[in-house]
Amino acid sequence: MGTFTHLEDLAYIANPIKSLLYEMRGSLEFEIVGIGDTRAIQNVFKNTPVSIKYVPTNCVEYTQFCSWMQRNLDWHFGIAPLLKSEFSDSKSDIKYLDYSILGIPGIYSDVPAYSSTVEHERTGLLSANDNDSWKLNLKRMIEQPELRMALAKQAEEEIRSKRTLATQAHRFLDAVVSIRSQSIV
């Protein structure tokens, strides 16, 4: 799931995905949401069967997109590959938030955007950006439903208790009060 800017991230881990789709043909599906260049995706996955789900144009605003995800995604787990770069180092953990609030366990690249918030093997799986690590973590998620359920539950609890507006609005108000109380020199 992601914008066209994530095609390179997805392509980087395409080999372990293709390998597992081949090994488990007929019992495994891979669905892509959001990356808009169908030809580029087909080129990355060649003759590998992948499903591409398009977000309707009336659902591209974030709140509508979240509702659309809730209605249309029935995933056992999500992935968030992200290559290490200066650009990605400034990214947020939005996929972790998206997946977690929807009760979807995830595998995330072990890069600052995710390693600062995802607790490996508690709220998600952190994967080194190499084919072996991604394949191992993909297999774990596929073969261990109890792991998926535990990760999803713990991640959702973590987000609902610490990362929602309802639980954090006071911090914003505290910051405003603190700033207003400081004398301007």
Image (cartoon, rainbow, N blue to C red):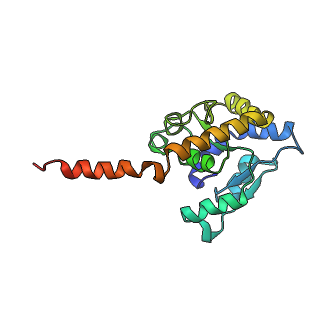
Figure quadrant of residue 40: bottom right
Q: Nearer the viewer, residue 70 or 177?
A: 177
Residue at the far right: name it: 26
Figure quadrant of residue 153: top right
Q: Nearer the viewer, residue 65 or 112?
A: 65
Q: Nearer the viewer, residue 110 or 185?
A: 185
Q: Position of residue 38 (x, y in %)?
A: 70, 58
Residue 22 appears anywhere in the view:
yes
State the residue at coordinates (59%, 50%): 98
Residue at the far bottom: name it: 58
Residue 106 appears anywhere in the view:
no
State the residue at coordinates (88%, 42%): 25
State the residue at coordinates (72%, 55%): 73
Residue at the far left: name it: 185
Q: Note whether 52 is above or below 77 in the view shown.
A: below
Q: Position of residue 108 (x, y in %)?
A: 61, 38
